[in-house]
């Protein structure tokens, strides 16, 4: 039997059917099924008919802004066919520094004696000794840094150390995750950074050498 309903404004009554007046069959409510087409989208089907898509949130995930880098060149450093170890520059620089200081002290001492005898000492040897001190200090400092950080970036050159302590010369390149332009390694405030070549001041991140594959193993892969 049909129920009745009334309007709250005019109080007119209307019949509400729960069956078809002509076929006398019970009426059914339309079924609603949801089909998920993605993490952020839903498509609604009513009685099997596609009513369109409903957009929830963003249409797609955030773009990948990861900066990917890799080695495009690897060459082991060797002296007489023997791989150069990371501690060699420390020892060589330390010995050179001590030897140069000893020569300078000896030179100054002999120079004073020469002045007393009327002989003016040559400044060429003294300049050479001081130059040797500068080179020795550079070797010592570079060896200490590459021993501690496992990499060393100087203008136009990059050196890396593998897990066996061997030194390699390498070139690291990549693509900026923000704009897609090439990146390069630079030194900034005594730290190495990955810097975009197109937006060097805006697009730069810290270089984390530990996230790269061991340079020795990477060299073997390059040879295969």
Image (cartoon, grey):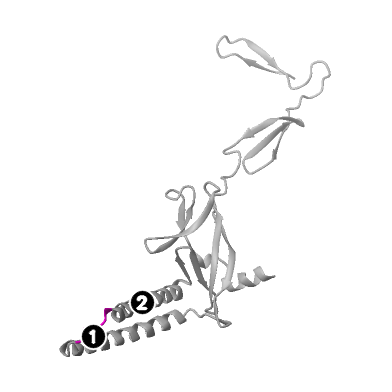
Q: Which mark is residue 48?
A: none
Q: Residue at x 82, y 15 (%)?
A: 22
Task: Identify the image quadrant of the C terminus.
Answer: bottom right
- In three-dimensional space, the C-alpha distance between marks 2 and 1, rounded to whole angstroms, equals 21 Å
In the visual, does 154 lie left or right of 29? left
Give the class, few, some or many, for how many residues have Cα within 10 Å of label 2's Cα (few <14, many ≥20).
some
In the visual, does 67 lie left or right of 33? left
* Extent of the magenta region: 119-123
Dots 2 and 1: beta carbons under 8 Å? Answer: no
User: Residue 100, how many percent across, how many down?
Assistant: 33, 84
Mark yes or no: residue 217 visible. yes
* Residue occupying the far front of the picture: 118
In the visual, does 81 lie left or right of 152? right
Q: Which residue is mark 1?
A: 108
User: Residue 136, how many percent across, how many down?
Assistant: 37, 78
Q: Is-magenta flag for residue 51?
A: no
The relative height of residue 169 versus residue 70 in the rendered view (above or below) is below
Q: Residue at x 77, y 21 (%)?
A: 19
Towards the viewer: 133 or 193: 133
User: Residue 4, how many percent across, how many down?
Assistant: 67, 16
Q: Earlier in the sequence, mark 2 or mark 1?
A: 1
Element type at mark 1? helix
The relative height of residue 177 versus residue 159 in the rendered view (above or below) is above
The relative height of residue 92 versus residue 46 in the rendered view (above or below) is below
The relative height of residue 116 versus residue 209 in the rendered view (above or below) is below
The tally of labels here is 2
Task: Identify the image quadrant of the N terminus.
Answer: top right
Q: Which residue is mark 2?
A: 137
User: Residue 161, how many percent across, how many down?
Assistant: 52, 74
Q: In the picture, residue 15 is in which quadrant?
A: top right
Q: Residue at x 26, y 89 (%)?
A: 106
């Amino acid at each position: 039997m049909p129920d009745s309903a009334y309007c709250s404004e005019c109080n007119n009554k209307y019949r509400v059917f729960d069956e078809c007046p002509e076929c006398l069959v019970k009426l059914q409510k339309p079924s609603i099924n949801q089909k998920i087409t993605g993490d952020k989208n839903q498509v609604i089907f009513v009685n099997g008919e596609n009513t369109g898509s409903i957009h929830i949130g963003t249409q797609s995930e955030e773009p990948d802004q990861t900066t990917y880098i890799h080695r495009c060149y690897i060459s082991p450093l060797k002296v007489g066919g023997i791989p150069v170890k990371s501690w060699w520059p420390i020892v060589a620089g330390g010995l050179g520094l001590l030897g140069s200081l000893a020569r300078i002290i000896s030179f100054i001492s002999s120079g004073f004696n020469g002045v007393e005898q009327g002989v003016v000492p040559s400044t060429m040897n003294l300049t050479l000794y001081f130059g040797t001190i500068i080179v020795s200090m550079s070797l010592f400092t570079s060896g200490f840094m590459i021993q501690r950080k496992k990499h060393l970036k100087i203008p136009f050159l990059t050196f890396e150390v593998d897990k066996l302590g061997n030194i390699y010369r390498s070139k690291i390149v990549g693509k900026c995750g923000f704009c897609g332009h090439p990146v390069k390694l630079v030194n900034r405030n005594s730290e190495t950074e990955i810097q975009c070549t197109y937006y060097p001041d805006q697009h730069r991140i810290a270089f984390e050498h530990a996230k790269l594959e061991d340079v020795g193993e990477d060299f073997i892969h390059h040879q295969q």
